[in-house]
Amino acid sequence: MKRIVIFASGSGTNAENLIKFFHNSDNVSVIQVLTNNPHAKVLERAKNLKVSALSFNKVAFIETDDVLNILKSSKPDLIILAGFLWKFPEHILNAFPNKVINVHPALLPKYGGKGMYGINVHKAIIANKETETGITIHYVNEHYDEGAIIFQAKCDVFPSDSSNDVAEKIHKLEMEHFPKVVEKLLNE
């Protein structure tokens, strides 16, 4: 059985989608959700789907091995960042080489880096009059949004689109592609 741990910071729609996608799988299981936000809606979503969920603080994540030790005891085959807003620390990346992936709401290398998440990305897309955008699923390294690209999917951006319209299109791409790419990675 392949084991997934998901990190999320907010509402958790991608986490919920992944949990539901693998719910009846015989060979993949989402075993835990971890969040840096004790008020994140992802905690409630995980609980409702009967998946263990914990929140942690910056000290436990960066300055000590608390989160690393939780991960070591969970033995994940893949760690998935799904709307997780903190930079992943090197000591955890070193313990799980090529096992940490992220979904980014733009076509990297464009619109990546510190502060480029969620609606910030979509507003920049609109401000720069881009004609297309999309999602990038990539490995996580020590730099924001610079890990090797695994998969990209594109969508059109029309002159009449608002940043919320773009957000909706990106959300659809994430819901459609993210679980399938995760499944493919775990089967390789």
Image (cartoon, rainbow, N blue to C red):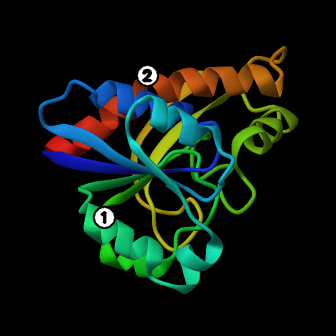
Residue 98 image label: 1
> Can you give x and y, in whole percent of width and height, for residue 139 in the image?
40, 58
In the image, what residue occupies the spot 58% across and 53% down?
84
Q: Is residue 16 above or below residue 108?
A: above
Looking at the image, can residue 93 be seen? Answer: no
Pick the quarter of the image with the N terminus. Answer: top left
Within the image, what quadrant is residue 128 found in? top right
> Can you give x and y, in whole percent of width and height, for residue 47 in the image?
47, 36
In the image, what residue occupies the spot 31% across and 40% down?
182
Q: CA distance from mark 2 to mark 1?
A: 23 Å
Q: Nearer the viewer, residue 84 or 149?
A: 84
Q: Is residue 56 above or below residue 188?
A: below
Q: Is residue 128 above or below residue 86?
A: above
Q: Earlier in the sequence, mark 2 or mark 1?
A: 1
Q: Nearer the viewer, residue 123 or 79?
A: 79
Residue 176 image label: 2
What amino acid does circle 1 point to? Answer: Asn
In the image, what residue occupies the spot 24% across and 44% down?
185
In the image, what residue occupies the spot 67% across and 21% down?
168
Q: Is residue 5 left or right of residue 105?
A: left
> Can you give x and y, in whole percent of width and height, for residue 135 in the image?
54, 36
What amino acid does circle 2 point to? Answer: Glu
Q: Is residue 2 left or right of residue 53?
A: left
Within the image, what quadrant is residue 114 found in? bottom right
